[in-house]
Amino acid sequence: LREIDDVARSYDSSISQASATIAQSQREVLIMNTAGVNVSDTQTRTRCVVQTIAKNSEGIQSAHEAPGRSVGSEFFTEFSVDEIARIAASRAVTLLEAKPAPSGNLTVILKKGAGGVLFHEACGHGLEADHIDKAQSVFAGKVGKQVASPLVTLVDDGTMGDEWGTYRFDDEGNQAQKNTLIKDGILNDYMWDVLRSTKLGHQVSGNGRRETYEYVPMVRMTNTYLEPGTSSVEDMISSTEYGIYCVALGGGQVDTVTGEYVFGVTEGYMVENGVITYPIRGATLIGNGLQTMLDIDMVANDFDTWTGTCGKNGQGVPVSAGQPTLRVAKMTVGGTAQ
């Protein structure tokens, strides 16, 4: 923690505050019921969160970086705490130098991992079977229909390596699975728990989750991601005449019934004539999840994930979301540039 603090504060003279947290938990799960289920699981998770504040005569900006994995101290063999500190510090410093973002319908490039939270919120929740059952999803009744660009394959995978949302069994005792929700742009299936699968005559998919044993299980995501494509990031940027390059997204809101969403960009840059030019701040992405999926016109061959806690009906569970770098041909951007 002291090393993280030293690295963050020494990154630039404008860094006025830095804080760091290393959190590790181990959860022992035993599930037994009258249907004959008898399973157990040990879930260990480690996360490092670094927050920084940069200040100069122009103002104050804050930033953070917070990777996590479902492992113990092995976390520190995959991640360098120095690099986590540098990313958080550089993001805050960059925002000090940023210009107000433009507004309008622009091409948007989402860096690998950065857009995971957008697809988690704008698409993933709409593919949970309880929303489908209540007809509260824009994806209701669309199985077998095109709901995204042919470049898009969306997966929810509770077995995905050491990702934040990985487990052996869900909180109803069903084995975690890899579920392909959208295949080549065609809606393939939803995510299911015992209640909805029994009611609607469908197999469970290992997505019955709850915060602790004190809560009722419900349909939840695990590790939800878009599979990589074949384009290169360099070609994606060089073929973009005018748009923004989003490196990190912040909080947002989504309406699962309509698919409408709003997300803030916490680190972004302008792309002009095929070149990344200057940093921007105050950008907001506004759109419809269904339309955004249809408007994806390039998907890169890289990949990264985002670590977070998903809230639903008062319960929070660990999840991850991910995607390769991708380009949305047209998206509404709200900015503050005059």
Image (cartoon, grey):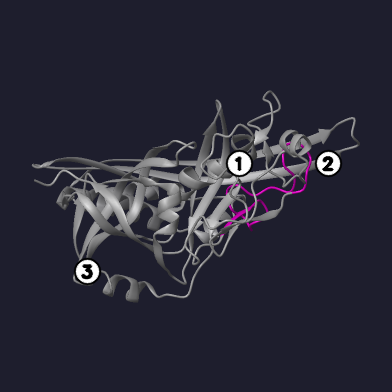
Q: Main secondary structure of the magenta part?
A: loop
Image quadrant in which you'd find residue 155: bottom right
Q: 265 or 243, which lies in front?
A: 243
- Residue at 28% over, 74% down: 239
Is residue 174 within the magenta segment? yes
Which numbered disc, 1 or 2, marks the residue closer to the eye? 1
Identified by mark 3, the residue type is Glu
Q: Nearer the viewer, residue 3 or 136?
A: 136
Res 241 label: 3
The local secondary structure at tag 1 comes to loop
- The answer to whether one can see residue 112 in this image is yes
Q: Position of residue 300 (x, y in %)?
A: 43, 70
Q: Quadrant of residue 36?
A: top right
Which residue is drawn at the image coordinates 49% and 67% (left, top)?
A: 151
Image disc number at residue 128: 1
- Residue 39's disc is 2
Residue 78, given in percent of the width and then of the height, sits at 53, 61
Q: Residues within 10 Å of mark 1 (few under 14, many from 20)?
A: many
Q: Residues within 10 Å of mark 2 (few under 14, many from 20)?
A: some
Find the distance from the CA under tag 1 to the CA under tag 2.
Answer: 24 Å
Percent position (x, y) of residue 80?
A: 45, 58
Question: Residue shown at 49%/71% (left/top)?
Answer: 229
Compared across the picture, whether 184 is left or right of 258 comes to: right
- Callout 2: SS: strand
Give the magenta part as a residue range. Answer: 154-175
What amino acid is labelled 1 in the image?
Glu
How many neighbours does mark 3 have within 10 angstroms: few (below 14), some (14-19), or many (20 or more)? few
